[in-house]
Image: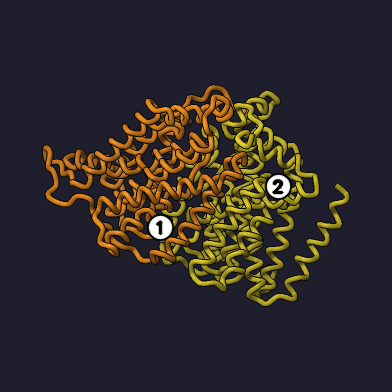
Chain colours: A yellow, B orange
Amino acid sequence: MRARWPWVLLLVALLALGPQFLKSYQVYLLSLAAVYALAALGLNLLTGYAGQISLGHAGFLAIGGYSAALLQVKLAWPLWASLPAAGLLTALLGLVLVIPALRLSEIYLAIATLGFGVAVEQLLPQWAWTGGHQGFSIPRPELFGLALNSDLAFYYLILAVGLALVWIAANAVRAPLGRAFVAIRDNELAAQALGISLARTKSYAFLLSAFYTGIAGALYANLVGYLNVSTFNLGLSILLLSMIAVGGLASIPGSLLGAAFLGLLPQVLSGFSAWVPQFIYGAALLLVVIFMPYGIWGFLLQTVGRGRGLMRSARRLFPGPRAESGSTGGDDHA
Amino acid sequence: MMEILPQLIVSGLAAGSLYALMALGMILIFKTTDVVNFAHGDMAMISSFVALTLMRGYHQPYWLAVLAAIAMGFVLGALADLILRPARNAPILTLLIATLGISLMLSALGGHFFGYQTVSFPYALVGKPFVIAGVILTRHNALALGVAAALGLGLFALLKYTSVGTAMRAMAQNRLAAQLMGVNVRRVSTLSWGLGAALGAVAGVLIAPVVFLDLNTMITVLIKAFAAAVLGGFTSLLGAVVGGLLLGVLENLVGGYLSTQLQTTFVFLLIIVMLAIRPRGLLGAPVAGRRA
């Protein structure tokens, strides 16, 4: 554990000082990637650790974004109050999904959460104060009298909030709660036999995940300065799921890496003509998951020979019928 | 209000039969290879565009264009199987994301070769609709129902009475055991993918006249087919048919009686309620304890 600290410090120093040398627009893109990373982290807590698949996380982003924006614009709440309030509100609404999650798993839960995302997308424009399908704009806020209207200033806010949340997540997954997540993912019956309450653990998983994603949504609203429901569609939910699959399931560095990779790739490719970026993006997605089935982080760990634990936990997650039949894999290459 | 009920049901069944066709393909692929194919919609999109290009650009007859679409679907499915082969033992979620990559690539290619605009697609049959007891059934809808029924039964017969079908069922139960019994699992897997995507292509050319054709319409259809398949149980072919028809009817009833603006929301709410009652879908395997 101790050997990890220098690396973490180096990374934090890089994230803190690096943007000083970047152009304003590049800082903005980095901030956007950081917001995605936070949302991906929230999804990974739920899907990677607790094994509850969600195809509706764009709905949580939308709820977080809209509640933060409405609290700021309509009720004139300051940022320090609206940001956590948006997270808490999203977390409470996240509890709605616990009801189907107690009965459903895997692909059936995927459809239920997909329905949640669709419902949020269709319901939000129904209320007049959300600006309907036109959307509405939000001014950059200030924090304790400090204007955050430069991209760099807002980047530091996102970085500070993000680092705090990453630190909390890193501790939470090693605390009894995080162990309970993994236990219900690996075997619900065995977990119950150990005295873990399914209802309570799943509720906490959804609460925590929705809280993280809600905060990400709130930061997104202030960063982009404009909200429109069509942003928060199924495509975004799938993008978040891709990020954690590409980065590494049940892994905090994996969530961040996946979000950085898929969040920044379109910008890198933006120089090509219309169809090429999408093709390369799809091909990259395909190649990464085929050749690194446990994500970029899993691959990195594997190459330094420490990947066995992560690989085992990834294999246990969403096991196919193959896992039941006890086949060891690679059978048709014999 | 009540007099439109039979009409809503019949139109719903026609739409639902096409969701069922799409769902059948997805489930065939899932059962034999454990892959949830998110590229199913884009495969149908490319196949439909191929048919359209043959008809509009090269003035080929409808039947030939549809045959070409089916062949295209088969080739795309088989190719996907070959591409995914190295990742066969990856977790299900990883494989799902991989098919998403294929979906994005196909969509990009579709945009490049067929353009980004929305185009109309010819109906297979035009002419006076059938009117039975005051219920209107267009010729196209009648054809859709007929084709879906024929292909559904055909698939059932294939699985039940042919050696390939038996091999597919064996693979669905246990891949290793099937291989030990002499099943060429690679070939059967490629064949399942090809057949599944070909079914999607048929659904595509029959849906395209109704929803019009562009890069994204088939994705909407795919989501509905996916929901239908899950509602039916996701491992049951009969479930796909029941789920597809039920979804088509539900959608029409909600649109006719409740709200068109919130149609999808209500439909998903109903699906969630039904899944809450039967957590493995209507015809899925019962939950016998918790699988590890």
Q: Residue at x 61, y 44 (%)?
A: B87
Q: Is residue B107 above or below residue B183?
A: below
Q: Amino acid at mark 2?
A: Ser
Which residue is at 41% across, 45% downward?
Answer: B197
Q: Is residue B137 left or right of residue A276?
A: left
Q: Where in the figure is residue A79, as x and y percent of width and height?
A: 63, 64
Q: Amino acid at mark 1?
A: Asn
Dot 1 corresponds to which residue? B216
How many numbered discs, if any?
2
Q: Are marks 1 and 2 on the same chain?
A: no
Question: In the rendered image, which residue does mark 2 sit on?
Answer: A251
Indicate which label's residue lies in the foreground, 1 or 2.
Answer: 1
Separation of marks 1 and 2 at Cα, in angstroms: 33 Å
Q: Residue at x 41, y 63 (%)?
A: A133
The chain to which mark 2 is attached is: A
Label 2 neighbour load within 10 Å: few <14, some 14-19, many 20+? many
Q: Residues within 10 Å of mark 1 (few under 14, many from 20)?
A: some
